[in-house]
Amino acid sequence: MAIKTEEMVLNMGPQHPSTHGVLRLELELEGEIIKNVKPHIGYLHRCFEKHAEAMTYPQVVPYTDRMDYVASMYNNFGYAVTVEKLLGIEVPERVEYIRVIMGELQRIASHMVALGTYGLDLGAFTPFLYLFIDREKILNLFEMTCGARLLYNYIWVGGVSHDLHPDFLRLTKEFIDYYRPHIAELNELLSYNKIFIERTANVGVMPLDTAINYGMTGPNLRASGLKFDLRKDEPYSIYDRFDFDVPVGEGKMGTVGDCWDRYFVRVLELEQSLKILEQAIEQIPEGDVQSAIPKRIKPPAGTVYGRVEAPRGELGYFIISDGSVNPFRMKVRAPSFVSLSIMGELCKGHLVSDVVAILGSIDIVLGEVDR
Amino acid sequence: MKQPKEIFESLKEKFTEYNFEIIEDLPVEPIISVDPLNVNKIGFYLRLDADLQFDSLMVLSGVDDNNAKKIKQEDETEIDDPGTLSVYYHLYSTTLKHKVTLKASAPKDNPEIESVEKVWKTADWHEREAYDMIGIKFLNHPDLRRILMPYDWDENSFPLRKDYENPEFYQGIKVPY
Amino acid sequence: MYELLYDIFGSEIIAMIIAACMPLFLFILPFALIAVLLERKVSAHMQDRLGPMRVGYHGILQTIADILKLIQKEDIVADTTDKKLFNMAPVLVFAGSYAVFAAIPFSGAFIGSAADVGIFFIIAVSSIVVAGILMAGWASNNKYSLLGAMRSAAQIISYEIPTALVVLSIVMLTGTLSLNTMSIQQTAYFWNWNLFGGAADGFVQLLLLPFTVVAFVIFYISSLAEVNRTPFDIPEAESELVAGYHTEYSGMKFAMFFLAEYANMFAVSAIAVAIFLGGYQSPLGYLGNTIGVEWLIPYEQLFWFTVKGVGLVLVQIWLRWTLPRLRVDQLMTVCWKYLIPYAFVNLIIIGLISLI
């Protein structure tokens, strides 16, 4: 007698502990094996692009904060770089250095959230809190500079909103010395934990050609083995002045491009960001930070696509200007939006538990997916 | 490493039957405008040609050009030109490290553009977004649904069009409430 | 204990009821209250934070406040649940883990039932929990609950095999199924514990030592899995299945599951203590013997039993807040490919040695 079988559809989210926000995944299951995954997004859609059309260029900056709210500083940074490219203005040296310092601190903070919540997804609670204790110190540095801890509105077109606090550089240096040993601690606690490796190695393998075809960028692409980092390959701001490595996935625990590689590339990037920070603190000149801020931004008619290496990958702003004070069209290429589209491809044939592992490893922020 | 001008020339040589135009008087980057119904073939050529190798689609953006105007005809009657909707393709080659921007425009009353989802998988969701927001119909797209807006949103209402007006009711609830 | 109560009340039924309720009110409830707080405080300090601090001094009354909240909560039963099973499941789960306490020798003078088949009874009766969990998962009519319940049932049934095999090897060594007799055999100093080869002669004990240690490790791992603790908390893996089989429960019914979980934590630790760690015997000799006060000895035994049990519970907490969680197939791999073969080989070797 044939037993009647049918696939089970499991709705994961929008309220679910490990969808990192309000993402709904429609899983088609056969037992615990995934047949198909359909992501449904849009629960956090706040009409950034429509809003931007009604705002003047400087007014858009606070809105960019609210996209990737874990890495707001870098969203500001990307926007400022893009508009400056359209306007063709140069910003003072000190501003460039401040931006790089803020950007790299933000990258560390953002990766901390990514790594910590990844551990949390796999059931390791303690590393998450250890990482958040250290992230707190970075947020304190940000608070000291611009008064905000999450949404900064700090990097403006042509400058930054405040100069650094007199103690900032000293405290940042102290933070670097304090934090460096903690990366080794994280490795002991989580990265090289046997159970963690079992859960992540050879899971959700992303071959390089698939990764490029799906438009993966940032750590996700590098984990698949391509040494591609906009800070090196297409240096914006002053990134060409610093000496740092671009870590790539090596398949140390399994196959190149598996979840463990994506995780570990982020761990290695922490180290590189600290390296950049050290150099930037050494070299930073004195100067005025607001001299280049234009009184009225009215760019020439035309289009510009500017992209920066945000913690989650390539953050691009496509701006069409019609010569007025408002952008005619602003489109954001959000790295998480693009990364999430590969979910269906990666999850096929894995178990329900692996969905969590894969989703955590591509590191999305729903604020940015939905904008 | 190729400049947009050279890419434009090679495209023209390869596809003699299609129209190409290069818009160069822009402040940052020139744009090549291409035939909307054959953009997938052009895409395949750009991706697979050994000298071009545009393996990465950085972003695909739908734009309402807002260029509707009235055209006066010889017999003094006016007809409405609804204007165009456009799609911008920003391409990049991870091996050769060069970039190009393509633009495909379609008339607003029948905005049909061929899908490039088969060429670059990235385009899948970006095209859905362009459909959702601007209302461009991508031909041969496997799954053209709304993506950011609710699935039950009014079929003919596309929020990022310049002539969009807020609906008065959504699911029987007054907007703005 | 029952005889004493019978003498006091003169009625079998009242004595029975009181004897049956004693462990619940004297031990399980207070223990659950303390264990929840312990878990929260220990995990908090492991993670460099303070944990509950508001209710009472350093938050010691926090669990009582939580219980009060749970009692007051509305008991939500969704429309599409199978009401009978849904209401029965938490009771069954709790009953299963409570029944285990009947055969645990807390001290020489306090054993619910000194039945000769103690350990056999425990292994049998704790399987009721599986039925309860399956009922909860099925009756909730929720896919997460169902997945959690299926995982849980598979896990508990699988891990009962290595547990039983290890217990069997110790039963072979001691020649008894009664936990009380086992505890008595492990009297005097700690090198007489079954963990260190039991009360055998010097040479045989040395031979046995590595194998009984292995047996203990296997037993501890599989008992962790049987009570669904990290790294084996797959049935209720919160990041995947929200809360597993008790997703749909609220209020007191949820509290029953919760209580059962903590009761179980202590139950498996207590069994491990009784089998391997000398039961209620003191590792250092009794104060009562030294100063010649005999009635002190049972209390000392109770003290030692609790200390050892809570010690093992602390290890469980420590593991939970350190390790990530296994995947469901890896869980089965650990059981079927490693624990069961090792337990088998261990059983054979211990059998051969005890022939000497």
Image (cartoon, coloured by chain):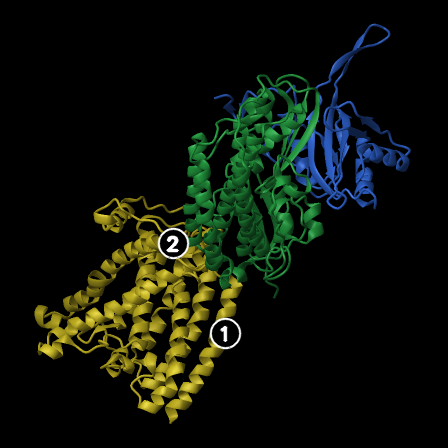
Above-or-below relation of C334 to A4: below
> Mark on residue C338?
1
Residue A228 located left or right of residue A169: right
The residue drawn where x is 55% and y is 46% is A275
Point out the frontmost of discs 1 and 2: 1
Looking at the image, is mark 1 or mark 2 earlier in the sequence?
A: 2
Determine the chain carrying the residue at label 1.
Answer: C
Snapshot quadrant of residue A51: top right
Front position in the image: A74 or C196: A74
Q: Which chain is yellow?
A: C
| Number of numbered labels in the structure image | 2
Whether discs 1 and 2 lie on one chain: the answer is yes
The residue drawn where x is 47% and y is 55% is A186
Q: Which chain is green?
A: A
Identify the residue position indicated by label 2 in the image. Answer: C86
Above-or-below relation of A19 to A307: below
Q: Colour of chain B?
A: blue
Label 2 residue SS = helix
Task: Indicate the amino acid at tag 1.
Answer: Tyr
The residue drawn where x is 8% and y is 69% is C8
Report x, y in % for residue A293: 57, 22
Front position in the image: A159 or C134: A159
Report x, y in % for residue B103: 76, 30
From this viewpoint, is residue A68 visible? no
Snapshot quadrant of residue A86: top right
Mark 1 Cα within 10 Å, few/some/many (few <14, many 20+)? few
Mark 2 Cα within 10 Å, few/some/many (few <14, many 20+)? many
